[in-house]
Amino acid sequence: MNTMRTLRKIAAFFWRDFLIARGYRLALVAQTVEELFGVATFFYLSRFVDSPQLERALPAGRSYFTFALVGFAFFDYLSVSMTAFDSSLEEARQNRTLEALLVTQTPLPVIIAGSAVYPFVALALRTCVYLGLGAIFFGFAPRGANWFGALAILLASILAFAGLGILSASYQILFKRGNPAKWIVLGVSSLVSGMMYPVSVLPGPLQMLARMIPVTYSLEGMRAALLAGAGWGQLWPSLVALLAFAAVLIPLSFAVFGWALRRTKITGTLTHI
Amino acid sequence: MPVPAIVVENLEKFFPPALSGWRSLLHPFAPATQCALAGVSFVVDRGEAVALVGHNGAGKTTLMRILATLVLPTRGRAMLDGFDVANEPGHARERLGYHTGGDEGFYGRLSGRENLAFFAAMNNLTGADARARIASAAEWMGLADDLDRQMRTYSTGMRHSLGLARALLHGPSVLLLDEPTRSLDPLAAADFRRLLKDDIVRRRGTTLLFASHTLAEVEKIADRVVLLDHGKMIACDSPLGLRVSTGTPTLEAAIGHILRPGTTAGGSR
């Protein structure tokens, strides 16, 4: 009963955000055009990239373009996870709907989770557009890809990233804005996770750092599944690492979030801008 | 004997001092030393309309926000329909409707109906039940013809009505209103007061606790007045009782007399 209610509420959040986004149709068109430019940039950049080291890191017959396209498309899941939860909170504060939401029969964790559903669904569509544009215009052909493996890696990644996102929202609840942790996680991850180049080109200490963040395993697993058609046996180290991150980060983030929420109810700053 | 709609017992609230700049970095969790409520106690019976009156900073909004489960009390307790708002906030919220006097708090790009449907879902109302309640609330608030317009095109008065419709959608037994008419023109405010007193309190039997600076409004709507000053409750009586006990001709004079003994006029606006 409660699960059904929660799902109905999450659906209501999705519908709300869809209706709002529908009001900005031009922005949707502009975003697709922007994605086309992004994919084209990778394609032409890849024509100039020719490194023996890179070739060794890529699956046989794959180009730098496919490597970067998958890296760029799936790194977005970390970016959205790190921003969706606290942005939903910030937006509700700014348009003064947070107070109205908080006196309903929906607890704040459901409000924040529900508000993050639309950005994730929109991102999934954007990923399809990215890969589709790459396939249509620039010869990206994921033949022999392990799609179920890629889906498993994606779901495990979202779980692990959501933990980081909820931690980021906890900071936002407490300190309102200027979330440095978010930008540190995103900055370090974009540097060392292998989004644009293989982790193997990094110096030793940065490679060690790369092993401590979930997005590295996410990109490795995703490239293995999509570009090399890796089987479950080859994907499991990435999957296990991502699930281990999720197992630690999700309970930790809920505990920190609960504490932050209680703290702001004591200080009376929950709805402050 | 029925459980009172609202019970407030020795309620105290202290906030940490507001710090900025490097002080806030050095003391992110400064101790709560600023007193907002100092041992306030009163009871509101079912179907009663009670006004919270006092200067700015007297503690009215803090009290409202504690009852609305938005702020935790430091000491004491507040019960709503028998549920402790600090320890059982979910149960308290089932019985609670809350509306502040502002005209914000909606999604401007959604229609009035879509806004109400979203908040209905947040209060566990879906499907035909939600649609019927939205239609009836809109009819009641005089919004039926405008319900499918985008909310951003609504006038202030219409937004107010939409806010009240939202607060009443799930049939709460207690309605909390913080300065409900502060941004309404005099005619809209008069209509709003009539709606509150005649329909919501008398006809529906909803318990009403509202904060107001408008004493004419208080006199029209309230069965009793809780007078707060610097976080303390200094009087709790009917408007007539306050006038009689102070020997003054108006509520304004009575409140002025209580807040500043020796004078017979002034006080809260």
Image (cartoon, coloured by chain):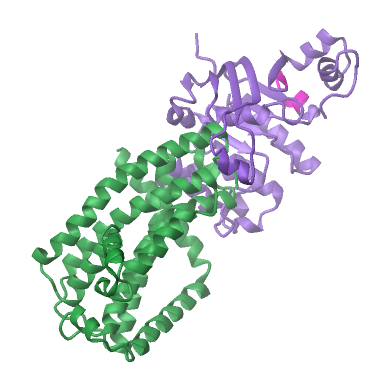
Chain colours: A green, B purple
In which image quadrant can residue A140 be found? bottom left
Left or right of A94: which side holds B269?
right
**Looking at the picture, how far across and down is residue A143, in whole percent?**
17, 81
Q: Is residue B238 magenta?
A: no
Q: Which residues are magenta?
A: B218-229
> For this view, does B121 lie left or right of residue A212?
right
User: Residue at coordinates 47% horizontally, 22% vertically from top-left?
Assistant: B84
Q: Is B67 placed left or right of A28 in the picture?
A: right
In percent of width and height, residue A260 lies at 46, 39
Residue B208 drawn at (x, y percent): 62, 26
Up-down relation of residue A270 to residue B80 (above or below)? below
Image vertical order of residue B54 relative to residue B118, above or below: above
Q: Residue at x 88, y 24 (%)?
A: B266
Question: Can you see residue A118?
Answer: no
Q: Nearer the viewer, residue A195 or A97?
A: A195
Q: Residue at x 51, y 43 (%)?
A: A174
Name the outermost residue toward the front.
A204
Q: Compared to B161, does A54 lie above or below?
A: below
Q: How many marks?
A: 0
Closer to the camera in the image, B159 or B127: B159
Residue drawn where x is 39% and y is 53% of the image = A165
Residue B146 at x, y = what percent?
62, 54
- The image quarter containing residue A201 is bottom left
Please state which of residues A268 and B134 is positioned toward the viewer in this rendering: A268
A137 and B237: which one is in front? Answer: A137
- Where does the N terminus of chain A fall, quadrant-wise? top left
